[in-house]
Image (tube, grey):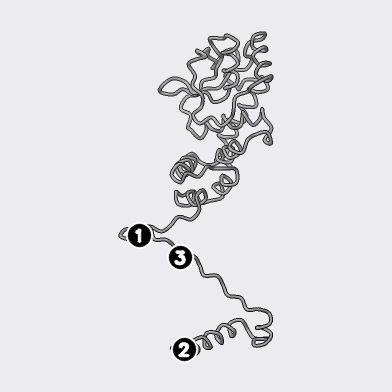
């Protein structure tokens, strides 16, 4: 349960922002800064598309009339700021002619915690069924530890396999090791011998099935192991005679 505590706190913060009740410590301007609206970079690999069409137009008109009511959430980076929650507010604000945007600045935030802000705030605004398959895969991967997320992305790039919703579900069930995550994404990998290189595994031979007529004629009520032994002896004698 302790491992879930930071994520639940982030979820609580996100809910407060969406319903218009800022998290503790940011009321009356505390913790909210006015930032250059063009000085915030989108979250790296942001998995959600920006609003378009009527939904975007309505948001722009609302901002022109009322401004941005809820602050966006950003994290401080060495180059400036990265957007966690508020990509659409930033985009609509630019179209509305704003030069600054109210923001809650998070510092010393890990990639894993940052990703939780991105995913959970978006899921609260969109129906899960409305998300595209890549987006649903991103949701699945967001529940993994940070290191496992990095291994999954590296395995996807290495193998050339795009992680869809089903593959992401397999990754979540796999042991959190590089080999297991790679196999969950790209399938079982061939053995690599330090001298011979890649050693391709031979496909397992398909079992030979006896017809119902042969079984009834020769092996009725015979144990399967005895059937195998009889056939082995018969074939050995036949090949010996043939030579």
Q: Secondary structure at mark 3?
A: loop
User: Percent from the top left, x then y, of residue 22?
Assistant: 62, 20
Q: What distance separates the C-alpha of mark 1 from that of mark 3?
A: 15 Å
Is there a contact, CB below 8 Å, between mark 1 and mark 3? Answer: no
Relative horizontal placement of residue 89, taking residue 193 as reference (left or right)? right
User: Percent from the top left, x then y, of residue 193?
Assistant: 35, 59
Q: What distance separates the C-alpha of mark 1 from that of mark 2?
A: 40 Å
Q: Secondary structure at mark 2?
A: helix
Quadrant of the rendered image containing residue 208:
bottom right
Mark 2 or mark 3, whichever is nearer to me: 2
Q: What distance separates the C-alpha of mark 2 from that of mark 3?
A: 29 Å
Q: Residues within 10 Å of mark 3 (few under 14, many from 20)?
A: few
Read off the residue under disc 3: 202
What's the residue at 60%, 34% (across, down)? 8
Q: Nearer the viewer, residue 120 or 218?
A: 218
Read off the residue under disc 2: 242
User: Percent from the top left, x then y, of residue 176?
Assistant: 49, 48
Quadrant of the rendered image containing residue 6:
top right
Q: Nearer the viewer, residue 202 or 141?
A: 202
Residue 193 is tagged as 1
Badge 1 or badge 3: first in the primary sequence? 1
User: Percent from the top left, x then y, of residue 138?
Assistant: 57, 37
């Amino acid at each position: 349960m302790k491992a879930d505590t930071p994520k639940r706190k982030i979820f609580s913060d996100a809910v407060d922002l969406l319903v218009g009740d800022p998290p503790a410590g940011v009321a009356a301007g505390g913790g909210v800064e006015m930032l250059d609206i063009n000085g915030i970079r989108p979250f790296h690999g942001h998995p959600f598309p920006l609003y378009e069409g009527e939904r975007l137009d309505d948001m722009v008109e609302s901002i022109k009339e009322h401004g941005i009511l809820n602050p966006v959430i950003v994290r401080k980076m060495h180059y400036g700021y990265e957007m966690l929650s508020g990509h659409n507010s930033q985009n609509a604000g630019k179209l509305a002619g704003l030069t600054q945007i109210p923001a809650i600045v998070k510092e010393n935030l890990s990639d894993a915690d940052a990703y939780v802000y991105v995913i959970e705030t978006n899921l609260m605004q969109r129906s899960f069924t409305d998300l595209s398959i890549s987006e649903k895969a991103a949701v699945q991967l967001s529940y993994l530890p940070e290191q496992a997320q990095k291994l999954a992305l590296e395995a996807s790039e290495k193998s050339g396999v795009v992680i869809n919703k089903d593959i992401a579900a397999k990754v979540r069930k796999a042991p959190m090791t590089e080999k297991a995550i790679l196999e969950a994404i790209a399938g079982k990998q061939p053995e690599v011998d330090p001298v011979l290189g890649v050693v391709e595994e031979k496909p397992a031979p398909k079992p030979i099935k006896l017809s119902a007529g042969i079984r009834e004629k020769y092996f009725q009520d015979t144990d399967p192991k005895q059937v195998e032994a009889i056939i082995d002896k018969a074939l050995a004698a036949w090949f010996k005679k043939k030579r």
